[in-house]
Amino acid sequence: MVPSNSSNPQQSRWLSFAGQTIEIIYDAPEAQAIIEFLYRHVPADPQIPPHVQYTLHYDAPRFEFYLADDLLYQGDNRATLAGVMLGNMGYHLADKNDGGLFFHSAGLSWKGRGVLLPGASGAGKTTLTAWLVARGFQYLSDEFIFLTPNSHVMHPFTRPLNLKLPSRPVLESVLDYETHADQILTDSHADLVPPALLGCPKPGGTPPLKLILFPIYDAQAEQLSWQEQSKAQTGLRLMQTIINARNLPQHGFSQATWLAKTVPAIKLRYNSFDQLGDQIEQYL
């Protein structure tokens, strides 16, 4: 049975994205602070009732996080709790979705022009996203971008950037980790960094998609490789990053093909940000 904190009344927070809503019940200011840190930029749509309910309970110094009656996390590490919340709740936002393309992708905007950065975990898209935000790009998301059928409008799931610890030396020139330690959640694997610390106090937006960028960090690359992709190459790569493909007609193939035909795509291979310069800005 999910416990409750008798000294604090239960409250509710709805999170709506891509036509789906989930609900978090919480019972303490400490729990509310975690939810606010992760989801302050995620809206609630009162027209879409939640299909999944979570409970975040706090009894000092321990948190307990439940999906219905299933305990998902128990402990006092806020960063680990945040990672569990992001992973499980992200899954349930995508699991039933059949209204469009739900991409595992970062997203940015440059002067109103949207950039999609699809890729598997470990491709370096979040580190590149952080660097570009520090250069003046508008931050949309480092994890999920949703597009409805035959539309270029990017709908981002805006959250803190989930930066793996090895990216710290790369980003030290744009982010003072020591000064902002109290604003970053850190565990043994990653830092959760609010976009405001990179110079983007008001992230989000719904820009039109103008460029698809497939970034590949390669420590052995001697020089920058900037290759325009064919429509077939683009479509194939997009298909590999559609999270909700099993819910879509033809697994989303026709929708991905339409995007590949209407938006230019680049495969970018690099070994340092010094190689990039301002080429992405110039292309846009």
Image (cartoon, helix red, strand yellow):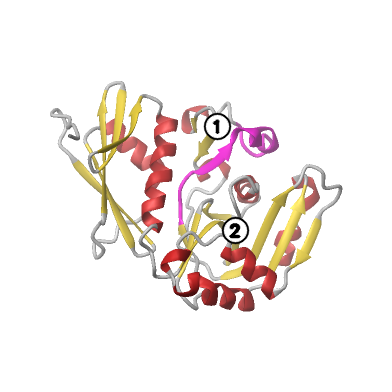
Secondary structure under tag 1 reads loop
Q: Is residue 170 magenta?
A: yes
Q: Which residue is drawn at 52% across and 67% down?
A: 207
Secondary structure under tag 2 reads strand
Q: Which residue is drawn at 57% across and 69% down?
A: 209
Q: Is residue 144 magenta?
A: no
Between the residue at mark 1 and the residue at mark 2, the CA separation in whole angstroms equals 22 Å
Image x and y of residue 59, in percent: 24, 24
Residue range highlighted in magenta? 157-176
Q: Which residue is drawn at 66% across and 61% down?
A: 213
The residue labelled by disc 2 is 118
Q: In which quarter of the image is the N terminus?
A: top left
Q: In which quarter of the image is the C terminus?
A: bottom right
Which numbered disc covers residue 258?
none
> Looking at the image, is mark 1 or mark 2 earlier in the sequence?
2
The residue labelled by disc 1 is 189
Label tally: 2
**Residue extending farthest top:** 61
Regarding residue 40, the answer to whether it shows in the image is: no
63 left or right of 84?
left
268 left or right of 62?
right
Q: Residue at x 40, y 58 (%)?
A: 94
> Tag 1: residue type?
His
168 or 178: which is nearer to us? 168
Image x and y of residue 240, in percent: 58, 61
